[in-house]
Image (tube, rainbow, N blue to C red):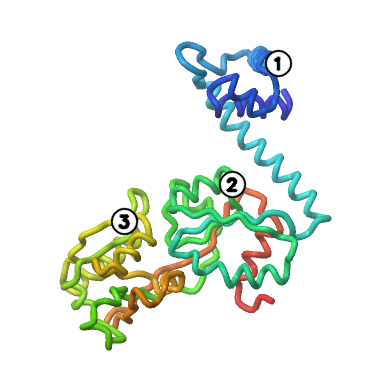
């Protein structure tokens, strides 16, 4: 069995159907069916259950898929590493970022482009769980996210470069004129406001951090909305619906005339931020250099 056959097998497994896999591979169905038969004959096992609709992996098939994906990733990494010995920093830098960290990217990319003009960018947004999956698949090179990182993979699978932590601030509607002259607020004052919080089914850390800080000051926040989108929460605040507590850097991505930021006087809690990448995967030079650009003293 060779790498070409492994690619055929992975395509069939992912598509669940010979016809779709052949289309994806730009080949005819009969040759692909023959290749699958040759693989099964060589291994002496049945890789797919052909009963019912579509093809379902057998236990042997699932094991081969796991091993095949790993081998193909290693092969692709080796090819990229060899090519980059001559090319240097070029190609597409694929970055995954949670929405609350997007504001950290523009200045960094602007600076990086001056040093490496041949690099282009793909930026993917999502929660920790989704970005972790994309990193595992090789769809992105690195992730910029809040810490701790809440993904399905084991924490030790990632290398993390911590960035300067981000203080939490209160965010209220600009239309709340009774607070228009204020520059700061106490935690207990937030108890009187309808509260909006950032939360998804799989990423809870920021929500829990804010709620725990409220409890530490002796009250339960009056949560009227849990939302997975930073942009939606900011829109609701702009409409006067309620208030929230967000990391300060989040506000740089939104108009300052519709929401107002207040420093929290009696709470100095911070949101951790970091860049993450996989330990066992080759990291392209463009990604290595981009990560290095966040390190102190880099020029």
x, y (%) of residue 283? 66, 54
Residue 264's place in the image compared with 100, above or below, is below
Q: Which residue is mark 2?
A: 139
At 73% from the left edge and 66% from the top edge, which residue is drawn? 116
Q: Which residue is mark 1?
A: 31
For the point 71% across and 39% down, the residue is 75
- Residue 9, image quadrant: top right
**Of the image marks 3 and 2, the number of the one nearer the N terminus:** 2
| Secondary structure at numbered mark 3 | strand
Q: Secondary structure at mark 2?
A: loop
Looking at the rendered image, the quarter that the C terminus falls into is bottom right
Considering depth in this image, is 207 or 59 the residue closer to the camera? 207
Q: Nearer the viewer, mark 3 or mark 2?
A: 3
Q: Position of residue 215 (x, y in %)?
A: 20, 68
Q: Residue at x 62, y 37 (%)?
A: 70
Rendered location of residue 7, percent (x, y): 67, 29
């Amino acid at each position: 069995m060779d790498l070409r056959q492994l690619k055929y097998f992975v395509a069939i497994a992912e598509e669940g159907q010979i016809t779709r896999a052949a289309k994806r591979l730009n080949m005819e169905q009969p040759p692909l069916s023959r290749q699958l038969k040759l693989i099964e004959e060589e291994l002496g096992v049945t890789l797919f259950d052909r009963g019912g609709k579509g093809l379902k992996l057998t236990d042997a098939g699932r094991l081969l898929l796991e091993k095949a994906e790993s081998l193909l990733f290693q092969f692709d990494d080796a090819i990229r590493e060899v090519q980059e010995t001559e090319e240097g920093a070029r190609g597409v830098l694929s970055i995954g970022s949670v929405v609350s960290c997007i504001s950290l990217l523009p200045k960094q990319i602007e600076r990086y482009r001056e040093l490496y003009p041949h690099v282009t960018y793909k930026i993917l947004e999502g929660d920790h769980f989704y970005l972790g999956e994309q990193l595992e698949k090789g769809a992105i090179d690195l992730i910029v996210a809040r810490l701790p990182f809440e993904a399905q993979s084991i924490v030790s699978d990632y290398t993390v470069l911590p960035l300067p932590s981000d203080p939490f601030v209160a965010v209220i509607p600009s239309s709340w004129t009774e607070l228009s002259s204020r520059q700061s607020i106490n935690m207990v004052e937030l108890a009187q406001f309808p509260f909006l919080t950032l939360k998804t089914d799989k990423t809870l850390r920021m929500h829990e951090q804010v709620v725990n800080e409220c409890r530490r000051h002796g009250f339960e926040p009056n949560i009227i909305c849990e939302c997975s989108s930073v942009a939606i929460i900011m829109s609701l605040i702009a409409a006067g619906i309620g208030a929230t507590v967000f990391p300060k850097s989040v506000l740089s991505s939104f108009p300052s005339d519709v929401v107002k930021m207040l420093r929290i006087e009696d709470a100095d809690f911070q949101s951790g931020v970091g860049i993450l990448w996989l330990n066992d995967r080759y990291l392209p030079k463009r990604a290595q250099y981009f990560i290095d650009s966040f390190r102190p003293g880099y020029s």
